[in-house]
């Protein structure tokens, strides 16, 4: 058997020196990464690949995914290739413009000029000047805008509450026992994501969804999506068409509303024409066109319950009533001849 030769001292020293240099190289690389992560100076290379919105974690609520509620969730905004674009970028530009920090056109695209404006704002507010717009930057923007004070809040009469929201006037009015009690300015849905029209009820109240939902949420029982009355971190949007369909209020105003309005309160949404009826409606159908049918039935004096977009038993019976009046087969189904006599086709 061959005898093993002992390793020479020179080889041992070389191995120790090699591994020492390797560890030093790895530590230096890590230090460079950390330094780059904390650097807040502008760089021509700070363009990030855009992440899909679905990759950003979202909190949950028992009424559904937060991101489904009228598209009010805030995604991270930053300079990317291709450039990020959308209504949220437009709102950011408008907010910075109101503060005198952005003088370029409202394009809805997150370009380098917008990033520079964001960094300038972040430096003014002792935030990390990285040009990335997240919750802290949105909140700082919100805090810079004055909010109207609610006067005369000490006396609230007893009685049944109702709310009317006029989407054309961008106004929310609270009625108590049929008398106007208080009026608030609101933001409503964009033309491409309109606020629903009809008669709904507040079925869920919760606090501090945060971000674009503000400090309070009053959820409506709209059957085709998650819509509600809520606060905002974009107070400059109040009085405009800006949302994904929800009703935005100043945070202090929605907090007051939250306190005086119970679950079950009727909310009437008015101010625009409902959608025309172009499909065959029947029990189990739901949608804005069902509300169009229900409103026409109400106008004829038929009792179909609330115009809430649900084709239920009461709506079916009201349709039967119209069919009997015109000598039709009273099957309670929405046929073109029913739409013709009701004027909804």
Image (tube, helix red, strand yellow):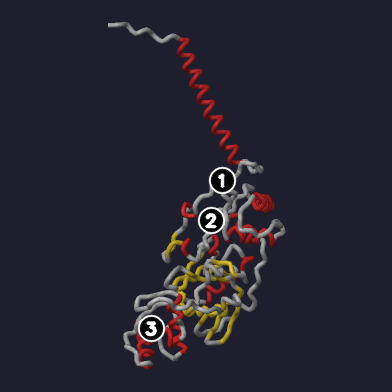
Res 249 → quadrant: bottom right
Residue 313 placement (x, y as % from top left): 34, 82
Which residue is rendered at x = 59% and y = 80% of the image?
Answer: 182
88 vs 63, nearest the viewer: 88
What distance separates the C-alpha of mark 3 from that of mark 1? 53 Å
* Residue on which the image places disc 3: 315
Residue of label 1: 48
State which quarter of the image contains the C terminus: bottom left
Tell me: 99 left or right of 245: right
CB under 8 Å between discs 1 and 2: no
The residue shown at (34%, 84%) is 332
Residue placed farthest to the top in the image? Answer: 2
For image coordinates 46% across by 63% down, the residue present is: 68
Quarter of the image where one finds residue 188: bottom right
First-in-chain label (1 vs 2): 1
Q: Nearer the viewer, mark 1 or mark 2?
A: 1
């Amino acid at each position: 058997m061959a005898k093993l030769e002992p390793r020479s001292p020179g080889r041992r020293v070389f191995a120790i020196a090699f591994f020492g240099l390797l560890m030093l190289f790895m530590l230096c690389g890590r230090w460079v990464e950390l330094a780059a992560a904390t650097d807040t100076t502008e760089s021509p290379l700070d363009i990030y690949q855009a992440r899909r919105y679905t990759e950003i974690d979202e909190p949950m609520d028992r009424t559904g995914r937060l991101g489904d509620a009228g598209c009010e969730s805030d995604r991270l905004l930053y300079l990317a290739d291709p450039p990020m674009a959308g209504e949220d970028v437009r709102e950011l530009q408008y907010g910075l413009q109101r503060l005198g920090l952005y003088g370029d056109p409202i394009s809805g695209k997150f370009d380098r000029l917008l990033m520079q404006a964001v960094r300038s704002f972040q430096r003014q507010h002792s935030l990390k000047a990285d040009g990335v717009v997240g919750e802290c930057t949105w909140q700082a923007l919100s805090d810079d805008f004055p909010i109207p004070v609610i006067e005369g809040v000490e006396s609230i009469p007893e009685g049944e509450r109702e709310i009317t929201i006029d989407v054309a006037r961008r106004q929310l009015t609270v009625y108590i026992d049929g008398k106007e009690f208080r009026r608030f300015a609101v933001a409503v849905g964009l033309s491409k994501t309109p606020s629903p029209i009809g008669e709904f009820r507040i079925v869920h109240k919760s606090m501090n969804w945060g971000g674009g939902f503000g400090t309070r949420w009053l959820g409506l029982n709209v059957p085709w999506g998650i819509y509600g009355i809520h606060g905002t971190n974009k107070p400059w949007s109040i009085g405009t068409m800006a949302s994904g369909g929800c009703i935005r209020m100043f945070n202090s105003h929605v907090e007051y509303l939250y306190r005086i309005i119970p679950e079950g309160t009727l909310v009437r949404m008015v101010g625009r024409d409902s959608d025309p009826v172009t499909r065959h409606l029947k029990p189990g159908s739901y949608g804005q066109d069902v509300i169009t049918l229900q409103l026409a039935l109400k106008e004829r004096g038929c009792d179909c319950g609330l115009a809430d977009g649900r084709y239920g038993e009461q709506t079916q019976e009201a349709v039967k009533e119209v069919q009997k009046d015109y000598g039709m087969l009273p099957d309670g189904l929405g046929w073109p001849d029913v739409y013709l006599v009701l004027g909804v086709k």
